[in-house]
Amino acid sequence: MLKTYSNRALLITENIIERRPYNDKYVDTSWENCALRKYFNGELYDSFSKEEEALIAETSISNNNNPWYGTIGGRDTKDKMFLLSIEEVIYYFGDSGDLKNRKGWYRGNNRFVLDELFTGDMETRSERDLLGRFTKVDVLKSSHHGSRTSSNVNFLNITQPDYVIISCALKNSYNHPHYTALQRYFDIGATVYGTFKDGTIVMTTDGKTYSIDATNKVTIADAGDRKTNTDDATVKNNKTENQNGVAYIGNSSTKRLHFPGCDSVTQMSERNRVEFNSISEASGYDPCGICKPQ
């Protein structure tokens, strides 16, 4: 119970009851139109008994614009179930990292020090698109298993992680982690650990301090590809046409263009492989940062 007033109470679930995305499509949306609101006030609400439903009051929700990112809040709504606003989260639970530095929303003394960022298989294009949403973090779970196609310089200059954790198998077929990715981590002064050296890595925090259960630091010698892929000889070899005379290979998933000899082409799924005879045919594709097709 977060708050009581008159004959009403604001309640929050004690345990996680469901995990759902805010919306089921990657498009601009607001609370009024998102899939999560439909679930809260539809399927979830309908799972209660009639007696329980009668106890859940309809509440007027003010959907203000996001004070940090400037995203539009949309029209106000009336809901039985809803998410807490940013102001309410900070009011009831205090700070959770660097919140006190954002538009003065910080209240209370409950300050937590650990900021983590889990990026999944995010690559450079997505990092670039979301760049304005990132902030300084303490620990970064390396994007795409330490692939050269992730963790670009601009992304790392903003997040500035103290520690980077790479999850990949020892001697994996993709040669992760890649030399260029490791070099970018070391260039910002990060300490790097990997599951291929330490096995399962456990991070523990009490909200004020944290520790990482890993002892074998990753070095540049641990790069699976053992090369920078940027020297003149490599670039020259990357330009070699394949046996069918194709000049360029595109990845339809990442929308990135490569020379046929690029290492990324050997790792590319056949279903994502698109062949081009000229740059002009590859409209909409970005050049690979390693082989630099032109």
Image (cartoon, rainbow, N blue to C red):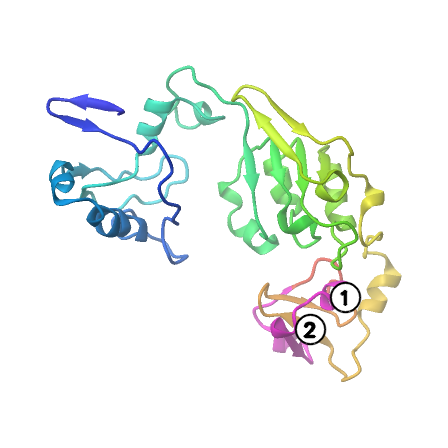
Residue 249: image tag: 2
Q: Secondary structure at mark 2?
A: strand
Q: Residues within 10 Å of mark 2 (few under 14, many from 20)?
A: many
Question: How far across and how far down the image is residue 162, in percent?
Answer: 66, 30
Marks 2 and 1, how far apart in space?
9 Å
For the point 38% across and 58% down, which residue is it? 25
Amino acid found under the numbered disc labelled 1: Cys
Of residue 110 and residue 40, the one placed in the foreground of this image is 40
Q: Residues within 10 Å of mark 1 (few under 14, many from 20)?
A: many
Residue 166: image tag: none
Residue 58 shows in the view? no
User: How many marks on residues?
Assistant: 2
Of residue 104 and residue 55, the one placed in the foreground of this image is 55
Q: Is residue 21 left or right of residue 234?
A: left
Quarter of the rendering occupied by the C terminus: bottom right
Q: Secondary structure at mark 1?
A: loop
Q: Earlier in the sequence, mark 2 or mark 1?
A: 2
Q: Residue furthest right?
A: 233
For the point 19% across and 22% down, which residue is it? 4
**Magenta residues?**
262-286
Q: Residue furthest bottom?
A: 244
Q: Quadrant of residue 93?
A: top left
Amino acid found under the numbered disc labelled 2: Ile
Question: What residue is disc 1 on?
Answer: 262
Question: How far across and how far down the image is residue 57, in percent?
Answer: 14, 37
Question: How far across and how far down the image is residue 163, in percent?
Answer: 67, 33
Q: Is residue 156 above or below residue 279?
A: above
Question: How far across and how far down the image is residue 131, in percent?
Answer: 53, 45
Residue 240 shows in the view? yes
Q: Is residue 48 left or right of residue 24?
A: left
For the point 32% across and 45% down, which residue is it? 72
Residues tagged 2 and 1 counted as in contact (Cβ below 8 A): yes
